[in-house]
Image (cartoon, rainbow, N blue to C red):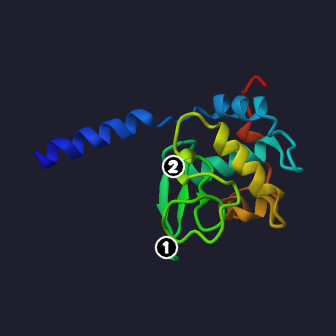
Amino acid sequence: HRSCTLVLLLLVAAANAKVFERCAWARTLKANDMDGYHGVSLADWVCLTQHESNFNTNVKYRNTDGSTDYGIFQINSRWWCRDGGVSTSNGCGINCSQLLTDDVRKAITCAKRVVRDPNGVGAWVAWRRHCQNRDLSSYLRGCRL
């Protein structure tokens, strides 16, 4: 019975996840005023989220310091949300589970809060590694924006 329950739980979890297609995600970001937000271009946001989560709203990644990164933006629990773990701060004022739903409004609002911090978009390692100082035109290519 335990294996059946586990399979059912995994199916329910998968049903709540949304994996955006690249251009649909770019349009969603644009509709939520992310293009140019705090100097971060739409292509930067698309690049960042592709490398953080592959546009998947339900990704969780456990870090070596005991914190967890959540959702499409991989927002860290130590500083930005509360998950009952090693949270030091809750900069976005939310439970981390709210970053895992297919309704991305809270995740976008939280990403806006993160980027207003002194580290800006550099808070995301994936952006520094894969997007910073690069030609990002391919991330929006073919998207009717």
Secondary structure at numbered mark 2: helix
- Seen at 80% across and 50% down, the residue is 135
Measured Cα–Cα span from mark 2 to mark 1: 16 Å
Residue at 58% x, 34% y is 103
Q: Residue 53 at x, y = what percent?
A: 56, 49
Q: Residue furthest top?
A: 144
State whether residue 145 is above or below residue 86: above
Q: Secondary structure at mark 1?
A: loop
Residue at numbered disc 2: 97
Q: Nearer the viewer, mark 2 or mark 1?
A: 2
Q: Residue furthest bottom?
A: 65
Please state which of residues 52 and 130 is positioned toward the viewer in this rendering.
52
Work out which quarter of the rendered image holds the N terminus and state it.
top left
Residue 59 placement (x, y as % from top left):
49, 50
The amino acid marked with disc number 2 is Ser
Identify the mark at residue 118; answer none if there is no mark: none
Q: Are marks 2 and 1 in contact (CB under 8 Å)?
A: no
Q: Residues within 10 Å of mark 2 (few under 14, many from 20)?
A: some
Residue 114 sits in which quadrant? Answer: bottom right
Residue 109 image offset from top left, x and y in percent: 72, 44
The amino acid sitting under disc 1 is: Gly
Task: Tell how many labels.
Answer: 2
Query: Which quadrant holds the C terminus?
Result: top right
Residue holding disc 1? 66
Tell me if 67 is positioned left or right of 9 in this view.
Answer: right
* Crowd around label 1: few <14 · some 14–19 · many ≥20 (10 Å): few
Going from N to C along the chain, the mark reached first, 2 or 1, is: 1
For the point 62% across and 47% down, the residue is: 50
